[in-house]
Amino acid sequence: MRVLLIEDDELIADGVMAALRESGAVVNRLALGRPGLQALKADRPDILILDLGLPDIDGFELLREAKRLAPDLQVLVLTARDSTEAKVQGLDLGADDYLTKPFARAELLARVRVLERRLGNAGAALIQIGPLSLDTRQMQASVDGQALTLSRREYMLLKALVENAGVIQTRDALETRIYGWGEEVASNAIEVHIHHLRRKLPADFIKTLRGIGYLVSRP
Ligand code: CA
Protein backbone atom coordinates (compact mmCIF):
# COMPACT_ATOMS: atom_id res chain seq x y z
CA MET A 1 0.00 0.00 0.00
CA ARG A 2 1.32 3.42 -0.94
CA VAL A 3 0.40 6.48 1.08
CA LEU A 4 0.97 10.15 0.38
CA LEU A 5 0.89 12.34 3.47
CA ILE A 6 0.43 16.09 3.05
CA GLU A 7 0.99 17.66 6.46
CA ASP A 8 2.96 20.78 7.43
CA ASP A 9 3.30 19.95 11.13
CA GLU A 10 6.64 18.11 11.50
CA LEU A 11 5.77 16.33 14.74
CA ILE A 12 2.47 15.00 13.46
CA ALA A 13 4.03 14.06 10.12
CA ASP A 14 6.85 12.13 11.81
CA GLY A 15 4.38 10.27 14.02
CA VAL A 16 2.08 9.33 11.14
CA MET A 17 5.00 8.22 8.97
CA ALA A 18 6.56 6.08 11.68
CA ALA A 19 3.25 4.39 12.50
CA LEU A 20 2.40 3.65 8.87
CA ARG A 21 5.88 2.44 7.94
CA GLU A 22 5.84 0.04 10.85
CA SER A 23 2.51 -1.29 9.62
CA GLY A 24 4.10 -2.04 6.25
CA ALA A 25 3.05 0.91 4.08
CA VAL A 26 5.26 2.93 1.75
CA VAL A 27 4.77 6.53 2.89
CA ASN A 28 5.87 9.70 1.15
CA ARG A 29 5.32 13.07 2.71
CA LEU A 30 5.09 16.69 1.60
CA ALA A 31 4.58 19.74 3.76
CA LEU A 32 2.86 21.84 1.10
CA GLY A 33 -0.30 21.38 -0.92
CA ARG A 34 0.77 22.42 -4.40
CA PRO A 35 3.71 20.02 -4.64
CA GLY A 36 1.33 17.52 -3.08
CA LEU A 37 -0.99 17.77 -6.07
CA GLN A 38 1.97 17.29 -8.41
CA ALA A 39 3.00 14.20 -6.45
CA LEU A 40 -0.53 12.81 -6.70
CA LYS A 41 -0.32 13.03 -10.48
CA ALA A 42 3.21 11.66 -10.76
CA ASP A 43 3.25 9.11 -7.98
CA ARG A 44 -0.34 7.79 -7.90
CA PRO A 45 -0.60 6.69 -4.27
CA ASP A 46 -3.44 4.44 -3.03
CA ILE A 47 -4.26 6.56 0.01
CA LEU A 48 -3.93 10.29 0.65
CA ILE A 49 -3.73 11.53 4.21
CA LEU A 50 -4.42 15.22 4.02
CA ASP A 51 -4.10 17.97 6.60
CA LEU A 52 -6.75 20.57 5.80
CA GLY A 53 -4.77 23.45 7.32
CA LEU A 54 -1.88 23.92 4.88
CA PRO A 55 0.12 27.13 4.42
CA ASP A 56 -0.09 27.40 0.63
CA ILE A 57 -3.49 26.15 -0.43
CA ASP A 58 -6.94 25.73 1.08
CA GLY A 59 -7.33 22.12 2.18
CA PHE A 60 -10.85 21.84 0.80
CA GLU A 61 -9.67 23.09 -2.60
CA LEU A 62 -6.85 20.53 -2.58
CA LEU A 63 -9.27 17.77 -1.63
CA ARG A 64 -11.63 18.66 -4.48
CA GLU A 65 -8.75 18.71 -6.97
CA ALA A 66 -7.28 15.44 -5.64
CA LYS A 67 -10.59 13.64 -6.08
CA ARG A 68 -10.95 15.06 -9.57
CA LEU A 69 -7.46 13.84 -10.51
CA ALA A 70 -7.88 10.42 -8.92
CA PRO A 71 -11.50 9.45 -8.22
CA ASP A 72 -10.49 6.07 -6.74
CA LEU A 73 -8.01 7.60 -4.32
CA GLN A 74 -8.96 6.97 -0.68
CA VAL A 75 -8.64 10.16 1.35
CA LEU A 76 -8.30 10.44 5.10
CA VAL A 77 -8.56 14.04 6.21
CA LEU A 78 -6.67 15.25 9.29
CA THR A 79 -7.84 18.43 10.86
CA ALA A 80 -7.80 20.54 13.95
CA ARG A 81 -11.14 22.02 12.92
CA ASP A 82 -13.46 20.13 15.17
CA SER A 83 -16.60 21.64 13.74
CA THR A 84 -19.44 19.69 12.24
CA GLU A 85 -19.56 21.99 9.19
CA ALA A 86 -15.92 21.34 8.32
CA LYS A 87 -16.48 17.59 8.60
CA VAL A 88 -19.60 17.69 6.45
CA GLN A 89 -17.88 19.87 3.86
CA GLY A 90 -14.89 17.53 3.75
CA LEU A 91 -17.04 14.44 3.33
CA ASP A 92 -19.15 16.19 0.68
CA LEU A 93 -15.97 16.93 -1.26
CA GLY A 94 -15.04 13.27 -1.30
CA ALA A 95 -13.05 12.61 1.86
CA ASP A 96 -13.51 8.95 2.77
CA ASP A 97 -12.85 9.44 6.45
CA TYR A 98 -12.01 12.06 9.01
CA LEU A 99 -9.62 12.23 11.95
CA THR A 100 -9.56 15.18 14.35
CA LYS A 101 -6.24 16.13 15.93
CA PRO A 102 -4.95 15.04 18.34
CA PHE A 103 -5.53 11.39 17.54
CA ALA A 104 -4.14 8.13 18.86
CA ARG A 105 -1.79 6.08 16.75
CA ALA A 106 -4.07 3.03 17.09
CA GLU A 107 -7.03 5.00 15.74
CA LEU A 108 -5.02 6.28 12.78
CA LEU A 109 -3.94 2.75 11.89
CA ALA A 110 -7.48 1.41 12.27
CA ARG A 111 -8.88 4.08 9.92
CA VAL A 112 -6.16 3.41 7.36
CA ARG A 113 -6.91 -0.32 7.49
CA VAL A 114 -10.55 0.41 6.64
CA LEU A 115 -9.49 2.51 3.64
CA GLU A 116 -7.08 -0.22 2.58
CA ARG A 117 -9.87 -2.82 2.65
CA ARG A 118 -12.08 -0.57 0.53
CA LEU A 119 -9.22 -0.17 -1.90
CA GLY A 120 -8.89 -3.93 -2.19
CA ASN A 121 -12.61 -4.21 -2.80
CA ALA A 122 -12.53 -1.60 -5.53
CA GLY A 123 -9.70 -3.05 -7.61
CA ALA A 124 -9.36 -6.53 -9.01
CA ALA A 125 -9.15 -8.78 -5.97
CA LEU A 126 -7.72 -11.78 -7.77
CA ILE A 127 -5.21 -11.54 -10.59
CA GLN A 128 -4.41 -14.73 -12.45
CA ILE A 129 -1.45 -15.01 -14.81
CA GLY A 130 -0.63 -18.53 -15.95
CA PRO A 131 -0.01 -20.65 -12.84
CA LEU A 132 0.26 -17.60 -10.57
CA SER A 133 -2.65 -16.12 -8.65
CA LEU A 134 -2.36 -12.96 -6.63
CA ASP A 135 -5.02 -12.27 -4.03
CA THR A 136 -4.72 -8.55 -3.33
CA ARG A 137 -7.20 -8.66 -0.43
CA GLN A 138 -5.25 -11.30 1.47
CA MET A 139 -1.91 -10.04 0.10
CA GLN A 140 -1.13 -13.62 -0.83
CA ALA A 141 0.40 -15.14 -3.95
CA SER A 142 0.22 -18.77 -4.97
CA VAL A 143 1.52 -20.94 -7.79
CA ASP A 144 -0.69 -23.84 -8.86
CA GLY A 145 -2.63 -23.40 -5.63
CA GLN A 146 0.49 -23.56 -3.42
CA ALA A 147 0.84 -20.41 -1.28
CA LEU A 148 4.19 -18.62 -1.58
CA THR A 149 6.04 -17.18 1.39
CA LEU A 150 7.00 -13.68 0.32
CA SER A 151 8.50 -10.77 2.21
CA ARG A 152 6.53 -7.52 2.10
CA ARG A 153 8.80 -6.03 -0.56
CA GLU A 154 8.76 -9.21 -2.63
CA TYR A 155 4.97 -9.18 -2.56
CA MET A 156 4.82 -5.50 -3.55
CA LEU A 157 7.31 -6.04 -6.33
CA LEU A 158 5.42 -9.03 -7.69
CA LYS A 159 2.15 -7.10 -7.49
CA ALA A 160 3.67 -4.19 -9.43
CA LEU A 161 4.89 -6.55 -12.17
CA VAL A 162 1.67 -8.53 -12.37
CA GLU A 163 -0.61 -5.48 -12.37
CA ASN A 164 1.40 -4.18 -15.31
CA ALA A 165 1.73 -7.49 -17.12
CA GLY A 166 2.76 -6.98 -20.72
CA VAL A 167 4.43 -3.64 -19.90
CA ILE A 168 8.16 -3.42 -19.19
CA GLN A 169 8.87 -2.02 -15.73
CA THR A 170 12.11 -0.10 -15.31
CA ARG A 171 14.14 -0.49 -12.14
CA ASP A 172 13.34 3.13 -11.22
CA ALA A 173 9.61 2.57 -11.64
CA LEU A 174 9.78 -0.52 -9.44
CA GLU A 175 11.81 1.29 -6.78
CA THR A 176 9.11 3.97 -6.59
CA ARG A 177 6.49 1.28 -6.10
CA ILE A 178 8.15 -0.40 -3.16
CA TYR A 179 10.23 2.31 -1.43
CA GLY A 180 9.35 5.72 -0.01
CA TRP A 181 11.23 8.84 -1.10
CA GLY A 182 13.48 9.13 1.91
CA GLU A 183 14.24 5.46 2.28
CA GLU A 184 17.75 4.16 1.92
CA VAL A 185 17.76 1.91 -1.16
CA ALA A 186 20.78 -0.17 -2.10
CA SER A 187 21.62 0.24 -5.80
CA ASN A 188 21.03 -3.47 -6.40
CA ALA A 189 17.92 -3.75 -4.19
CA ILE A 190 15.51 -4.53 -7.03
CA GLU A 191 17.87 -7.13 -8.52
CA VAL A 192 18.14 -8.82 -5.13
CA HIS A 193 14.35 -8.93 -4.62
CA ILE A 194 13.86 -10.21 -8.18
CA HIS A 195 16.47 -12.90 -7.55
CA HIS A 196 14.59 -14.05 -4.43
CA LEU A 197 11.24 -13.91 -6.20
CA ARG A 198 12.47 -16.02 -9.09
CA ARG A 199 13.45 -18.83 -6.75
CA LYS A 200 9.78 -19.02 -5.70
CA LEU A 201 8.20 -18.60 -9.15
CA PRO A 202 8.06 -20.75 -12.28
CA ALA A 203 11.15 -20.49 -14.47
CA ASP A 204 11.13 -17.46 -16.77
CA PHE A 205 7.99 -15.97 -15.15
CA ILE A 206 9.84 -12.67 -14.70
CA LYS A 207 11.85 -11.77 -17.77
CA THR A 208 14.89 -9.50 -17.68
CA LEU A 209 15.36 -7.01 -20.48
CA ARG A 210 19.00 -6.18 -20.03
CA GLY A 211 19.59 -2.51 -19.37
CA ILE A 212 15.86 -1.76 -19.55
CA GLY A 213 13.92 -3.53 -16.85
CA TYR A 214 11.67 -6.45 -16.06
CA LEU A 215 8.57 -7.92 -17.59
CA VAL A 216 5.83 -10.35 -16.71
CA SER A 217 4.19 -11.35 -19.99
CA ARG A 218 0.47 -11.48 -20.46
CA PRO A 219 -0.71 -15.06 -20.88
CA1 CA B 1 -1.51 22.24 9.39
Image (cartoon, rainbow, N blue to C red):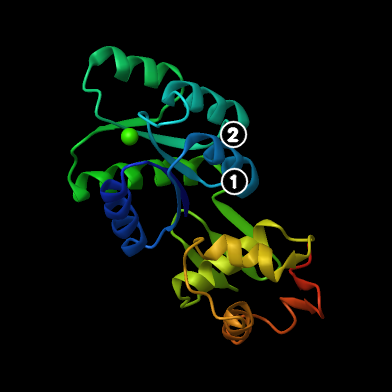
Residue at 20%, 50% (x, y): give it. Answer: 106
**What is the residue that sits farthest to the front in this orientation?**
55
**Is residue 29 depicted above or below 186 in this figure?**
above
Residue at mark 1: 44
Q: Quadrant of ligand 1?
A: top left
**Residue in the picture at 57% in, 54% down:** 126
Residue corresponding to mark 2: 70
Q: Name the residue type under label 2.
A: Ala
The structure residue drawn at horizontal position 57% and vertical position 85%, both measured from the top left corner, is 196
Amino acid under disc 1 = Arg
Q: Percent position (x, y) of residue 79?
A: 29, 30
Q: Nearer the viewer, residue 205 or 33?
A: 33
Side of 81 where 65 appears, left or right? right
Asked whether the residues under the numbered discs 1 and 2 touch, taking CB atoms below 8 Å apart as contact, a structural biologist would say: yes
Looking at the rendered structure, the secondary structure element under dot 2 is: loop
130 with respect to 75 (left or right): right
Image-quadrant location for residue 211 = bottom right
For the point 47% across and 68% down, the residue is 183
Label 2 beta carbon less than 8 Å to ligand 1: no
